[in-house]
Image: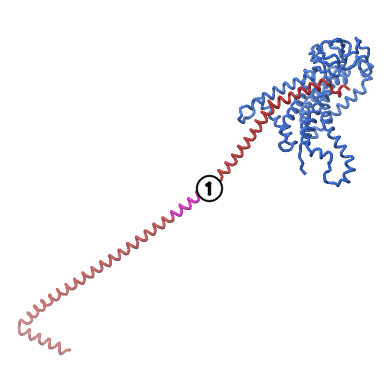
Amino acid sequence: MDLITPAVGQLFWGGLVFLILLFMLKKFAWKPMLTAVNDREQSIKDAIELAEKTKAEMAAMQAQNQDLLKEARVERDKMIKDATETAKKLVEESREEGKAQQQKLVAEAQKIINAEKAAAITELKTQVASLSLEIAEKIIRGELASDDKQKALAEQIANDISLN
Amino acid sequence: MKNYVRIIFFGLLLAVTNLANANDHDPHAIEEKVEKEFSAAEHAIHHALDNHEIHLTDGFTIPLPIILWTDNGLVTFMSSEFHHDDEGHHVVSKNDMNFVKVHDKIYQLEAGQTEVSGFDGDHHPYNAHKVTMDFSITKNVVALFIVAGVLMFVFISAAKKYKGGKPVAPSGIAKWTEPGVVFVQDIAKENIEGDKYKRFTPYLLTLFFFIFFGNLLGLIPFLSNPNMTGSISITLLLATITFVIQMMNSKKTYWLHIFDPLGHSLPWYGKLPLYLILVPIEVAGIFIKPVALLIRLFANITAGHIIVVSLISIIFVNKSLAWAGLSVPMTLFISTLELLVAFLQAYIFTMLAAMYVGSAVESAHH
């Protein structure tokens, strides 16, 4: 049967053409194409890997930032707390000091007042004594101006004594 | 999808066996009413065969050079010198030798004979012998050149799009070729272990696109549908090249699988009776595989061509143009199917070639 009988001519030309085609395409088509396609694939793979890595790094950095922020917040809170405490302490201290000062002042004032008072009383006493003496002198002078009066007085005194 | 493909495959196989049978039984009927009755089978087979001229339409035929290696040296002339005679009537004399063309085969008349005296039952001339060393540029050889030219043009210009060193997205023609190239590379990757696929990828790429473009060229109407990839010579050649590559790269593991397929699973006295059967089967398998490869492609593509011609012949068998209403839609359907087959057969051939080469180069892994 002709259909299944190989022909020498076709085998010859087919072999020649196919081998030349294989050689030519290998050199000028497949090599450059496959190299380019596979290089591109590699570069895409690399790029994706890099992106992935960068993403992970970013995430790590973000976490770090969060930590830093948290730390800063804690520190800030602590600082505010410390400051408040210090302020309170200062106020308290100054109040104490003020009170002490006040008390000291009051005590001093009291002392001065007492001293003044004592001085005034002493003077008053002296004054009263001298005045009493003067009055007594004047009264005695008056009483003793007449005999009657001297007598009456003597009597009165004698009465007082007898009453005792 | 797999079932669908299987149905198509068996459909085509059935069609080709039916037609082959028809061809076997019909000759008597044809012989009786020679020239009177139109024979679809004969026409279809003739169409699937190689030709010494390209017949585009009635009255428009491209002559092709005939190159013969005879006892008296090289003889060349154009096929037009036969004046479209295919029955051995017109004798062409060159270098003191007389040639006739019968059923697209060139015969050399025995010395001293000037015309064909008669034909035997197989339609071979009595007083002439076939020229076996026929290196003529036939229709299939022209198709071969066209496919090679188109392949080179398409893929070399596609490769130029990648110049410049930088990784670029495919542009222009490379947009169309890249998926195919990557597809074939994946076939190689899947079937050949490790990095070894890289060595065979260029061959598999050439093989795939050669078959694919060849199949497609045969499907273009009005170009006399050369049945190049459905020619047994071409499929034989492709299968042989694949076989040679497979054998040249075969490793120890491959031969161990053939001559010691059971390995250490049995003691030697257990293996001996089994191997009496197994080893011959395995050895036969080495050769059956490429033979199956060549028959599959040949049968599928030839079947497609025969079906198309047969369907068109419905009109001529019934001698009524009205039958075109049936014939043309069916032809259109089969032609569309053939587009799928064109790709599928290229894929199957390439995949099996990759598998065979892959089995030959694999290293021990037990």
Tell me residue B318's x, y (percent). 87, 18
Magenta stretch bounds: A69-80
Q: Chain of mark 1?
A: A
Tell me residue B126's x, y (percent). 93, 15
Along the viewing direction, whichever of B269 and B31 lies nearer the viewer: B269
Which tint was used for chain A? Answer: red
The answer to whether residue B314 is visible is no
Please give the name of the residue rendered at 68% of the width and 29% of the height, measured from the top-left corner: A31
Quarter in which the C terminus of chain B is drawn: top right
Quarter in which the N terminus of chain B is drawn: top right
Q: Residues within 10 Å of mark 1 (few under 14, many from 20)?
A: few
Q: Is residue A79 magenta?
A: yes
Locate residue A12: give its quadrant.
top right
The answer to whether residue A96 is visible is yes
Q: Is residue B9 magenta?
A: no
- Give the vertical position of B92 relative to A105 (above or below): above
Tell me residue B151's x, y (percent). 72, 23
Along the viewing direction, whichever of A19 and A71 lies nearer the viewer: A19
Residue on which the image places disc 1: A64
* Magenta stretch: helix, strand or loop mostly: helix
Along the viewing direction, whichever of A6 and B345 lies nearer the viewer: A6
Q: Given the current orientation, which residue lies at the most extreme bottom position?
A: A162
Kindly indicate which chain is depicted in blue in the rendered structure.
B
